[in-house]
Image (cartoon, rainbow, N blue to C red):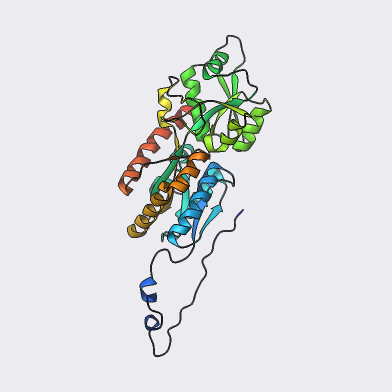
Amino acid sequence: MDRPHRPLRVTRRPLLGLGVAALLPGMALAQGSFPAHPLTIVVPYGAGSTNDILARLLATNLGAKLGQPVVVDNRVGAGGTLGIGQVVRSQPDGHTLALVSASSIPINRALYRSIPFDPARDLALVSITNSTPNALIVSADHPAKSLADLVALAKQPGAPPLRYFSPGNGTSQHLSCVQFQKLVGAEMEHIPYRGPGEAITGMMAGETAFGFASVPSVVGLVRDGRLRALGTTGPRPSALPGVPTLVALGYGSFADTDVWYGIAAPKGIPETVRTTLREALQAIVTAPTLRDRLSAAGFDPVPPMTAVEGDAFVTRQVSFWADLVQQSGAKLD
């Protein structure tokens, strides 16, 4: 795990007889400028997660844009609330940021009975940078060659309920399965795991029949033929060539279930700093080099939003995901 960044403390002493600005032209202008030292992006999930993959791609390019290194700090625990809580409590100067997502803000807000902060209230959204669909996947040797085949198996009279995996209760992948089960109208059994890697390994070993996984986490396995994707959430085709959207297959309610990702700061960040960060992030994610790398990894671009538009988007998402959490019956302490 990366060590948390601690900014270097520098003691400045006045020089006798001369102002510092006279000795070092331009230094007076630099006082209070942003960024004043390296930045940290706190990722509330483990290394190799979809959040982590995106954070590391953003960090390198954001550092080059701002002229200061950007460190990624994985703070795992409590379904993402541990890392987000660290950012909420940090100095609101723009140097400590959080990689946020549909899971860490709207889903956790509805899922946990008690959180010592409100992620929708105590964070200031800087920018939503990307989104990614979830893919409904089965193992390469599964008899279902299409979504219609899987639905037929689920509805087969007298057959035991299909078992589906998730990387944990209340995750977007679990909620996508809940939504799918409701639409299909067949009994199914939920098998939660402790992360996407363990869940996919379990399915490949025959412990479950299917599940949803983020496209960036399985794009290589699907392209290599080790997994089969039967459909993807969201309104647009994904980075998985030839895989239809669930919307195109007749499941229109999956149009709004793409998982979005962005950068947030503690509430109270100066608006000038928030604007600097937002403009820098929008510039790097639309630059062809990074845009193409993100696309190949399974991330879709999100059209730029103003601060007001971003806040309104999160408010709508809180309501949308809260309904799915309620349908799932999942609750965590």
Relative to 30, residue 59 above or below: above
Residues 9 and 39: in front is 39
Residues 55 and 196: in front is 55
Residue sitting at 51 percent across and 52 percent down? 42
The quarter holding residue 156 reads: top right
Residues 157 and 114: in front is 157
Relative to 225, residue 25 above or below: below
Q: Residue furthest top?
A: 157
Give x and y (percent) for residue 311: 34, 45
Give x and y (percent) for residue 143: 62, 17
Q: Is residue 168 visible?
A: no
Give x and y (percent) for residue 144: 59, 18
Q: Is residue 230 left or right of residue 26?
A: right
The quarter holding residue 260 reads: top left
Residue sitting at 58 percent across and 9 percent down? 157
Q: Residue furthest bottom?
A: 17
Residue sitting at 47 percent across and 43 percent down? 292
Q: Is residue 23 visible?
A: yes
Give x and y (percent) for residue 236: 42, 30
